[in-house]
Amino acid sequence: MEINVLRRLESTAMTYPGKTAFSDTESSLTFSQVEDLAKRVGSAVSQKAEQRSPVAVMSGRNVFTPVIFLGIVYAGCFYAPMDASQPDARLRDILSVLKPRLLIADRDNIEKARALGFEGEILCAEDLFETEINEPALKKAARFACADDPLYVIFTSGSTGKPKGVITSHQSLMCYIDAYAEVMGIDDSDVLGNQSPLDYIAAIRDIYLPVFFGASMFIIPKQCFVMPAQLFQALNDHKITSVGWSVSVFTIAVKVGAFSDARPEYLKKVCFSGSVMPCSVLRVWQENLPDAKFVNQYGPTECTASCTYYEIDHTVTDDETLPIGIPYRNYRVFLLNEDDTPTKTGEQGEICVSGPILALGYYNNRELTERSFIQNPLNGAYNERIYKTGDYGIMREDGILEFCGRKDRQIKHLGHRVELSEIETAALRLDSVSDACALYLKEKELIYLFYTGTATAKEAAVHFRAVLPGFMVPRKLVNLEQMPRLANGKTDMQALKAMMK
């Protein structure tokens, strides 16, 4: 049984040595080149870091970044990607949690890395690519590898303001990638179109599907995602067959009428996640790509990217709400009431997940780990960790899970429970609204709606009064030129909260 992602890489490199693994607008690497360069990086790192220790990485969105990640793994270590475009204070916070001895940066980011005041050793990635391969050192690291070794740490925002590092093992990653490929039908004929920043959890699909199955991955230039005509051109130029993108990308393309001039000719496998997909948007994609498979995916970083999926088997209607489906293989998903008793079919409860795909915990934060990854209250017979997602769901009689929103997105307003995401969904039914985010200012009991599009505040207010109960109608409507975004494509709610008065 394979216990390490590197064995999958070596098998793929042996089968497809000259095939392109990763490409961007400036470079491309074959599978044999990826293996060779990764072994060089691993040989260098193995002389400077202990096995099962973290190595921070500050590298650009290019084909060499996955090589650095895999090289760190060859040394028996695990990698922690850091986005150099983030504020210095956040990068320092990540380093203070991680406490690595090594930080690898490429030439474009090495000065930024040096300016952080890092006390460990900083290595230049391009220099590591010139290292002689040390087979004895790599074999020693492989000899002591285990399936539950950490593979990477992905940092997400924490409620305390400090980033939290979610640790994922080799086993968890392999379980997820195999299950995702099974659902999407990924094989060596596919060309993946990467959207996610490489330090974000969604990028693991684009990195490891080629490693495992011999597919290729093209890193789409960032500017294409705000100019859908260029995006469609890039998809066609590189014959992209499969994408896993955030919902906002699909929404923008429809709102600017991208399909009026072109359509992705080769795209057959489409997965979306990160937020609720408006069915009015999905329908346009379905009508323009009638032969494509569309899959809605749900899940947090703590469950190795995603835990459930729903394959859409019909052309949706605008007023439909998509369920989040059934668990991937190797995932157990169930609902609990607030008193940790099982939720009845058809009733709302908190979505909980268990199985070999759970993260190892939060790096250097035992207290938060023990609070978040708990013993299954329904199992008193043996140890079984579960993760409580903080999301509400309803399990239908047919076993399909419906998403009902986040705990922290449900408010008590004027004596009523209000789900803010329901207000956003109502806003997006207005054709002249392209994006929306509802927030609550508790001190003044005001519901805000931030939105982009051509709708006037008066038009939006009239629309809301027609589709929502009076207590849910936003009293503050703020029209923005563009919605503030985090690097992963999600709405930057902290930036919006700063605008609330």
Image (cartoon, grey):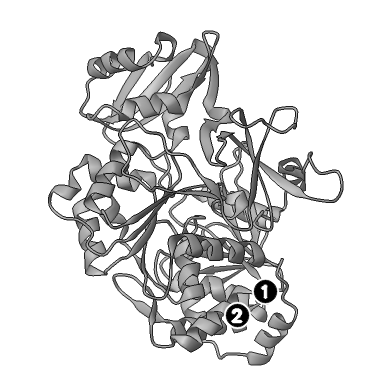
Label 2 with label 1: CB-CB less than 8 Å: yes
Q: Which residue is mark 1?
A: 3
Vertical side of 29 occupied by 238: above or below? above
Q: What separation in Å lies between label 2 and label 1 (alpha carbons)?
A: 8 Å
Q: Residue at x 33, y 70 (%)?
A: 24
Quarter of the picture containing the N terminus is bottom right
State whether residue 106 appears in this view.
Answer: no
- Percent x, y of residue 55: 62, 67
State whether residue 153 appears in this view.
Answer: yes
Secondary structure category for the residue under label 2: helix
Crowd class of label 1 (few under 14; some 14 to 19; many from 20; radius 10 Å): some
Q: Which residue is mark 2?
A: 7
Q: Residue furthest left?
A: 261
Q: Which mark is residue 385?
A: none
- Percent x, y of residue 20: 37, 80
Q: Amino acid at mark 2?
A: Arg
Total marks placed: 2
